[in-house]
Amino acid sequence: MALLPPFIRTARTPRRPSHLAAGLPADDEVLLDAPDERLAPALVAAGRGDHGPAAELLATTRKAAEWEDRDRYVTRLAAFARSREEWLGDWCAAAPDDPDALLVKAELAVARGWASPARSELLREVGPLIAAAAEGNPRDPVPWRVALDHARGTDAGHAEFERLWTEAVRRSPYHYGCHVAALQYLSAACRSQCRSRCGDTRHTRHGSHGECFDFAETAAQDTLPDSLVQALPVRAAFACLTESGGARVGRDRLDAAADRAIALSSRYAEADPWPAEVRNLLTYVLVELERWEDAWTQLRMIGPFATSAPWDRISEDPLGRFLEVRDGVRRHVTRARTRHSARPLLPRSERAGHARASGH
């Protein structure tokens, strides 16, 4: 995995106030994976053992075909259920055929399977749960995103993955979660092929990351400018940088992926929780590419909304690492701007004086 620059790897130290910090939330105001205003009440109620608000929220997204919101809420509710499952058990007992409860249950089972050393064996037992969730609401693409994650975990072959992908895009051609799952499958397939050839994932076969970029760029080109699928190439860049140091993909392609994600970010308001994960991921990539001013702009747009991904890939304290990165980028930008302002420039009046002298 590529490492962030040394100034970011060091521990944070007390700092003097900087004009660059103006308008940024203080460290203790930054939130990790903060829920939006729709999800927050459902999580609070679930913490009290009440599944009603969660059921109502997911039923609303299902009836309104709000698939992106639905996917995000299902993922967060399942994550909450990993440590507090009673409310979900009560929900499933009260409504065993509820497609929303079935979907959360399937997502939870896949997440637990992925976290287990016996991943493949556990995940193979989850297939019927995913099938039940898909049958419960045939037009919903989210169970098929879960199925795509499940297929990656069980090392399903390309034919099976293509079948699942076809079912997913038939329901929602530009669903972000399904595209991310497909990109992750391609990345995993590349790593698997490398291990079978040379036993070292650092020596990824030629063209593997290029294949991921091809998929991501084609998908982004086919979507609307404000679609989160526009961020797929920067996800491919992140995978490339963290798995092979970017050696297999040209710098121009990495920069283009970052530029596309910057354009997407600019279409959303600052401190908006919806694009927060994309902005956090983009910031990581910009730091790796040493594009400090662009990284600083994204940090300002993130505001108080830090996300676990991608910082949990490099630290057991993702919030702490996010704050370290923010401090490091600020210091780097401050130094760069100070050096620039200190350059000796020939004053306009002096240039004019020389011009007049040369005329005599």
Image (spheres, grey):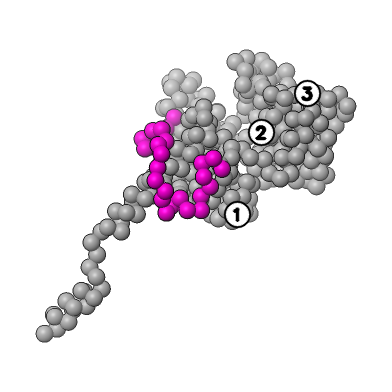
Q: Quadrant of residue 290?
A: top left
In the rendered structure, does residue 12 fall within the stretch colored magenta? yes
Local packing at callout 2 (Cα closer than 10 Å; few below 14, some 14-19, many 20+) is few
Residues under numbered marks 2 and 1 in contact, where contact means CB atoms less than 8 Å apart? no
In the rendered structure, does residue 7 fall within the stretch colored magenta? yes
Query: Residue at 37% across / 46% down in the picture?
Result: 332
Q: Which residue is mark 3?
A: 86
Which is closer to the viewer, label 2 or label 3? 3
Name the N-terminal-most of marks 1 and 3.
3
Kind of residue at disc 2:
Glu
Drawn side of residue 128 relative to residue 148, left or right: right
Mark pair 2, 1: CA separation: 33 Å
The part of the chain drawn in magenta is 1-29
Which is closer to the viewer, label 2 or label 1? 1
Kind of residue at disc 3:
Glu
Give the main secondary structure of the magenta stretch. loop
Q: Which residue is mark 1?
A: 268
Find numbered disc 1 in the image and state the secondary structure of the residue it sits on. Answer: loop
Query: Residue at 42% across / 36% down in the picture?
Result: 12
Query: Residue at 51% across / 53% down in the picture?
Result: 23
Find numbered disc 2 in the image and state the secondary structure of the residue it sits on. Answer: helix
The answer to whether 346 is drawn above or below residue 219 in the figure is: below
Q: Which residue is mark 2?
A: 162
Percent of width and height locating residue 160: 67, 28
Residues under numbered marks 2 and 3 in contact, where contact means CB atoms less than 8 Å apart? no
Name the N-terminal-most of marks 2 and 3.
3
Percent of width and height locating residue 213: 51, 41
- The quadrant of the image that shows the C terminus is bottom left
- The quadrant of the image that shows the N terminus is top left
Residue 123 can be seen, yes or no: yes
